[in-house]
Amino acid sequence: MAKYIFVTGGVTSSLGKGIISASLAKLLQARGFSVTIQKFDPYINVDPGTLNPYEHGECYVTEDGAETDLDLGHYERFLNIPTTQANNVTTGKIYQTVINKEREGAYLGKTVQVIPHITDEIKRRMQLLGAQGYDIVITEIGGTVGDIESLPFIEAVRQLQWELPDEDCLVVHLTLIPYLRAAKELKTKPTQHSVKLMSENGVNPDIIVCRTEHPLSPEIRRKIALFCNVKQEAVIEAADASTIYEVPLTMMREQLDVICLRKMGLPLGHEPELSAWKAFLDKLKYPKAKVSIGLIGKYIELQDAYKSILEAFVHAGAVNECKVEVVNIHSEFITPDNVDEKLAPLDGLLVAPGFGLRGIEGKITAVRYAREQGLPFFGICLGMQMAAIEFSRNVLGLKGAHSTEMDPNTPYPVIDLMEGQKEITEKGGTMRLGAYDCDTAPGSLVRSIYQHARISERHRHRWEFNNVYLSDMEQAGMLASGRNPETGLVEVIELPKHPFFIGVQFHPELKSTVENPHPLFVHFIAAARAHAENPSSDRKSS
Ligand code: GLN
C-alpha cells in the first residue's frame, strides 16, 4: 500500500510548492523509498500545451508525450526518474473524463455532480500511481487554498484522509511568513488564516512549512504550532536559498523527511544518501571559471519560459566547474547592424525553441553570426530550424528560404509540415510529442558526445526539416548527423568545420538532471569555456 503526502499552498502563489515537494521526495528517495510526485492543477485547460508561456511558463513534455506543468521538470531533475501522463492532472482532464462517461451512459441515469462524481474522479487519479507500487506518492495541489477552483481538490483530500487508514495520508501546508520591515517583525496572521480556511474545508494540515526571509524564532514556531494545531517540531522553516538545489539540504536540517516518516508510521530507513548531490552543489557554488551564453528567444523577460534550458545550464556548468552566466537577448531586437555589438562579448549562443513569426529574422541573423564567427552554437527545435534556414539562404543562396510556419508561400520550404500534420486542425496534444529514437552518424560530433549509435529524445513540434534540400545542404558542408530510424526525419544537424555548431529538432533540456546532466549541454558549455579561454583560435568561418 502506498502512502500519500499532499502538499497544499496558502497565502500566495509562487511560494515554491514544486521545489518543496521535490526536495521532500528527494530526501525520502535518498533514504531508500520509492517515491513519485504528481501535480493536480485546478485550471480548466485539459493540459498546459495550449497555454501561452506568458501565462504559464514552459510546457514540459514527458517521455510518453504528455504536455505538462513545468513543476514536473523539477520532479525529474531532482528525482532522476521520468514522469508520465499520470503525473499531471487538471480540472479540464477530470471534467473531460466525467463528461465522456456521462455521454456513454455510465452513470445510469444519475444526476452527475461535483460531489461525488468529480471528487471521485479526482480521488481515482490521485491513487493511480500509488497502485503502481510506489512506497510514497506526493501530490502537489496547484493554486492557493481559498481559490474557488481548488475546492473540489481539497474536498477530495478530505475524503481520502477519511477513507484511508490514518497513517496513510499526510498534509503538508506551505505558507508565507512575511517580514514587516517597519515593525521589524515576522507575521503569522496570514498563515493562521490560511490554515483556518483549510480546516473550514475539513482538512487539518499535519506539517506547516514556512517560507521566510528571516529565521523563525522559537516563539514564532510556538505561536504557529498553537494557532495551527500542529506540534512545534512540525513547524518547518524554509528560508530563502541561493539555489533551488540547496533546498533538500535545508529540509533535511529541519527534519521534514523524519517528521513525515514518523507520522506515516514508516521506518526512517538509512540516513539520506546525498553524496552525489552534495558534490554537485560544491561544484555549483565554487566555480573555477565563467562563460557567458546568449539565450536568444522571444520570452526572455520571463524566467519560467525557458526553465528547463536554464536548469540544464546549471547542471552542465557544475560538470565543467564554471559559472554559466545567461545573457537574455530578445530576438526581435537583433539586426544585421547591431548583431556584432550584441553577440561579440559572448562565449556561446543558444537559439531557443518557439512558435510563430515574431523575432524570427533576429534569430536567423544571430545564427549567421555564430556560424561565420566560429562562436559555439546550440539550436533547439525552432533554433535548429532557424539554423537550417540560415544555411539555405546564406550558403546555398536560396533567397527567401523559410519554414512554412512563418511563410506559407516561401519558394524554398526548407522546414515544412509532414503530410500527417497537414490535416490536423485541433491544437491540443497534436504535435509530434514525446520520445523518439534517433540514430547518430558515425564520426559525427553528436556521436562523440552521446557515445551511442541510437539515442532517444523528447519532441514537441509540428514542422520538420524538409529532406528535399538535404543533399544540397550536405554537399555544402552541413551534416545531418541524427536521423529518425523509421521515418528518416532529420533530428540533428551540425557543421563539421565549425568548433561547435549543433542544431537539434528535439528538446534535450527536458532530460537533464542533477545526477545525469545532459551531454549536449555539458559539451556545449565545454566548447564555450574553450572559446572563452582562447576566442581567436575559433574564428575560422565554415
Ligand atoms: N514552431 C516549431 C514547430 O512547431 C518549433 C517548435 C519548438 O521550438 N518547440 O515545429
Image (cartoon, rainbow, N blue to C red):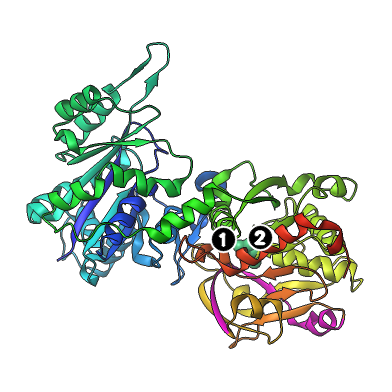
Q: Tell me the tag on residue 319.
A: 1
Left or right placement of residue 332 versus residue 464 in this view: right
Where residue 505 sits, quadrant-wise, is bottom right
* On screen, residue 130 above or below 258: below
Mark sitting on residue 129: none
Could you tell me the amino acid type at mark 1? Val
> Mark 2 and mark 1: span between their CA atoms?
9 Å
User: Where, quadrant-wise, is the C terminus in this rendering?
Assistant: bottom right
Q: Position of residue 67 (x, y in %)?
A: 47, 62
Residue 537, by quadrant, is: bottom right
* Residue at the (27%, 23%) spot, across then down: 188
Q: Amino acid at mark 2?
A: Ile
Q: Which of the pair 81/27 is nearer the observer?
A: 27
**Residue that mark 2 sits on:** 525
Element type where label 2 sits in the image: helix
Q: Quadrant of residue 375?
A: bottom right
Residue range in magenta is 454-475
Residue in the foreground of this view, choosing between 459 and 24? 24
Q: Residue furthest top?
A: 182
Assess mark 2: CB under 8 A from ligand 1?
no
Is 458 within the magenta?
yes
Q: Visible in this render: residue 405?
A: no
Is residue 305 in view?
A: yes
Residue 270 x, y percent position in the rendering: 22, 60
